[in-house]
Amino acid sequence: MSPYRVLTQHALTGEWLSTALPVTDLEYGPELSGPGSLTGTLTPRLVASNPTLVDPGTTLIYVEEAGELRWGGLVWDVRAKGETYSIEAASWSSYLMHRYDLDGEHGGRGPYTYTDRCQVIRNIWDYAQGVADGDLGVVVDSTTSTSTIGTPDDPYHSYWYDTTSLGDQVDDLVSDNATPEYTCTTEWNASKTGVIKRIRLGWPRLGRRRTDITFASGANILEDPENALAGDDYAQVVIGTGAGDGSAKLRQISAVRNGRLRLEAAADYPQVNGNDILAQKVEWERVRRQFLGTVEQVTIRDTPTAPFGSWQVGDDVYTRVHNSWGDYTGWCRITGWTIQPTAGGGPRAVIDLKPANAFQYGGV
């Protein structure tokens, strides 16, 4: 891994506050349909002499490696304790958690009927950044999808009196199966004089199945990962409910017998008005809950088997784990990662995974 540097910038003026902030214990990375995070520490003496270097809520922070920006976001929390001054930051979508729809319907862009969820996300960002002192300079992909929200009988509203943050609204738009996905990215512009802050939208998914890289014991996995056997989340029977009240409430059940003790789970989809759609969602939830023995995280070194920077959020990577508790092989989807450039023994990446076939794309 090439040398890195940390930069900070004023969110409104664009003034560069530091182009080589001496951050130690640095960890940073993105996530699927979330902002990702950055943590690190500074010496209190440095901050005391120049407190605007990391002013929470208005300071942007970036990580550059080999001349390319790898991560960017906003500093949200700084804490001094003894000789440690810790920093916590999150990428661009975290900003919307601190913004609200004060005008209603995203400033007249709603209400929404059969509206592409990607367009609603763009409207939310347009509204948030169209207010004085609210323009973060984030651009949202022009991606379109067939995943819609709102019906003539039940339009999707954003009310001025509702205290749901704009960030929570975006989370609701991408939290179900077969909905768009997003991640936050950061890069220099062509002249490397400015920063492109981007929300990458994916439909029907972000990432792709990778046959050129692997995560494998004895090749690039450093530590024995935990084998998750979560009986509390397991179920072969899922009872799903949709719109309606009392006996008029829609209900669908997906069930299989597989030689195991019967376990049941409930799932509520109050916005679903059709039994066919509800049945698809319930079946997907039942399939998801039938996974036992999954690898949820691996820690790897930078090797030719999977060089740092070669994978993206949403990619499926074939994963092979061999250790004393047994063997695990299968396609796993990357849902996020954290780069630790100053880790003992050399840089490493901690990668979050989920079984690839636990995801359903499009068609619902």
Image (cartoon, rainbow, N blue to C red):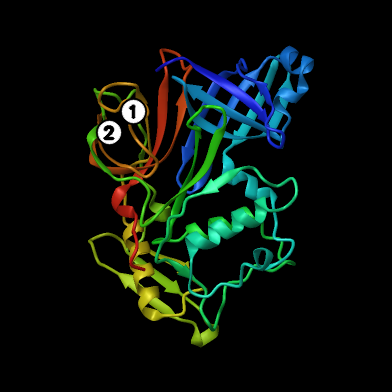
Distance of label 1 from label 2 (alpha carbons):
10 Å
Q: Residues within 10 Å of mark 1 (few under 14, many from 20)?
A: some
Q: Position of residue 151 (x, y in %)?
A: 51, 78
Image quarter of residue 24: top right
Q: Position of residue 188 (x, y in %)?
A: 50, 30
- Relative to 167, residue 192 above or below: above
Q: Identify the residue shown where x is 71% and y is 14%.
A: 83
- Name the residue type under label 2: Trp
Q: Quadrant of the C terminus?
A: bottom left
- Name the residue type under label 1: Asp
Q: Identify the residue shown where x is 49% and y is 63%.
A: 117
Q: Identify the residue shown where x is 35% and y is 21%.
A: 301
Give the residue number, with chain letter if any, for mark 1: 224
Front residue of this view, candidates 268 and 206 = 206
Give the residue number, with chain letter if any, for mark 2: 325
- Relative to 316, residue 69 above or below: above
Left or right: residue 18 compared with residue 299: right
Q: Kindly report which numbered mark, 1 or 2, lies closer to the viewer in this rendering.
A: 1
Image quarter of residue 178: bottom left
The answer to whether residue 341 of the structure is visible from this angle is yes
Label 2 secondary element: loop
